[in-house]
Amino acid sequence: MSHGITRRRAVAAVVAACAVPARAAAPVKLKLASFEPPMANITANVLTPLAREAAQGSGGTLQIDVFAGGTLGRNPSQQLKLVTDGVADLAWVVLPYTPGRFDDTEVVGLPFVTANATEASVALQRLYAAGSLVGFDGLKMLALAATPPVAIHANQPVRAPADLKGKRVRVSGDHLTRVVEALGGAPVQLGGGQIAEAMSRGVVDMTLNNWGFVGDFKVNEVSSQHLDLALGAVAVGVAMRQDRYDALPPAARTAIDKLGGEALARRLGEAFDRQEAEVRERVAKSGRNRVAQPSAAELADWKRQIEPLNEAWRRAKPRNERTYAAFAEQLARLRSA
């Protein structure tokens, strides 16, 4: 074979190789854990679409798979540990389930401070974005948010603070624990999936939950008396390890950042509030549940007995007062807008 033919074949092979498109790198795969059922409000309407939209906006660099229903770990109080241990890359977490770490976020749990989840979520996220909150070292929070304020759900009428005396009350968070104790009740800590069974068996007499939670975990099926009282919200968020985030391709980080932050906080808050209204209306019309609103005098009595506990929280340490003032300022801005 002549050298000319060999040379022409070599050149042709190079040209053919250059004509084949370079194979794209495989996307980085992340696991997002949720203890909620797949069709629960936040998982179905926020987290699953978020995972899809982040992948679509990443230029093929990212894939987020949602593991709902506790498939990576059922215990709601262990969701953050799934992230820090590397079992999950992201998780839907309830911050009071890690007591002593995210103390500043207790501000959303003060009774009668917030009116709905949207304003509470955006205000809390703004404090996080400003670096004003403690406990988040080593974490990348895609967003912080807050539930709607919790109400009282029981099987006997509850109208006055005295109705909690001697009752076993399921609570979440240190501040509501102190509130229940101050009113003569016995606080009980239970995971979300345990509440309905505990109420049906008489292990607890009542529970403090927002209406969306009541719908997701079927608490309305084992309770009949409900008092709409804004007894404080619960801080939540989507957590990721900072080093895992930092290791992502730039396009993947950009996609996450575009969907996260205040935009995600508002999205979470609005999803909570839509569900809150829907479940409250459905339960009120069920025929077996009575949803009561406190009278002006009853509300004044609740506030008179609980406000000293709110004030005690603000005065417990200097940063509490600063956090409360900053949070109240953001709420005022949101309400005036």
Image (cartoon, grey):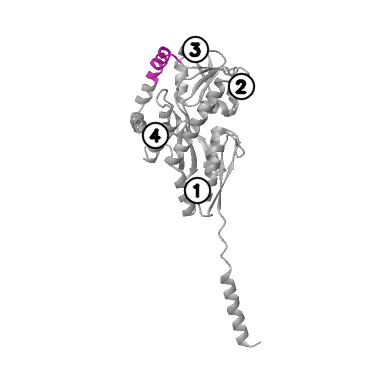
Q: Quadrant of residue 222?
A: top right
Region of the chain picked out in magenta, as a range = 294-309
**What is the number of the mark on residue 95?**
none
Residue displayed at 52% across by 25% down: 211
Q: CA distance from mark 3 to mark 1?
A: 48 Å
Please tell me how crowded label 3 is: few (under 14), some (14-19), or many (20+) other residues with Cα within 10 Å: some
Q: CA distance from mark 4 to mark 2?
A: 33 Å
> For residue 22: magenta?
no
In the rendered image, which residue does mark 3 sit on? Answer: 163
Q: Which mark is first along the chain, 2 or 4?
A: 4
| Residue 177 vertical position relative to residue 125 in the rendered view, above or below | above
Q: Quadrant of residue 168?
A: top right
Q: CA distance from mark 3 to mark 4?
A: 33 Å
In the rendered image, which residue does mark 2 sit on? Answer: 221
> For residue 302: magenta?
yes
Whole-percent x, y for residue 329 in the image: 33, 31
Q: CA distance from mark 1 to mark 4?
A: 27 Å
Whole-percent x, y for residue 239 in the image: 49, 40
The three-letter amino acid code for the residue at tag 4 is Ala
In the rendered image, which residue does mark 1 sit on? Answer: 244
Residue displayed at 57% across by 62% down: 23
In the rendered image, which residue does mark 4 sit on? Answer: 123
| Residue 277 vertical position relative to residue 130 in the rendered view, above or below | above
> Would residue 8 be found to the left or right of residue 321 on screen?
right
For the residue pair 173 and 335, the one nearer the viewer reads as: 335
Please tell me how crowded label 4 is: few (under 14), some (14-19), or many (20+) other residues with Cα within 10 Å: many
The three-letter amino acid code for the residue at tag 1 is Arg
Q: Which mark is first along the chain, 2 or 3?
A: 3
Between circles 1 and 2, the one closer to the viewer is 2
| Residue 258 vertical position relative to residue 204 in the rendered view, above or below | below
**Image mark count:** 4
Q: Quadrant of residue 262?
A: top left
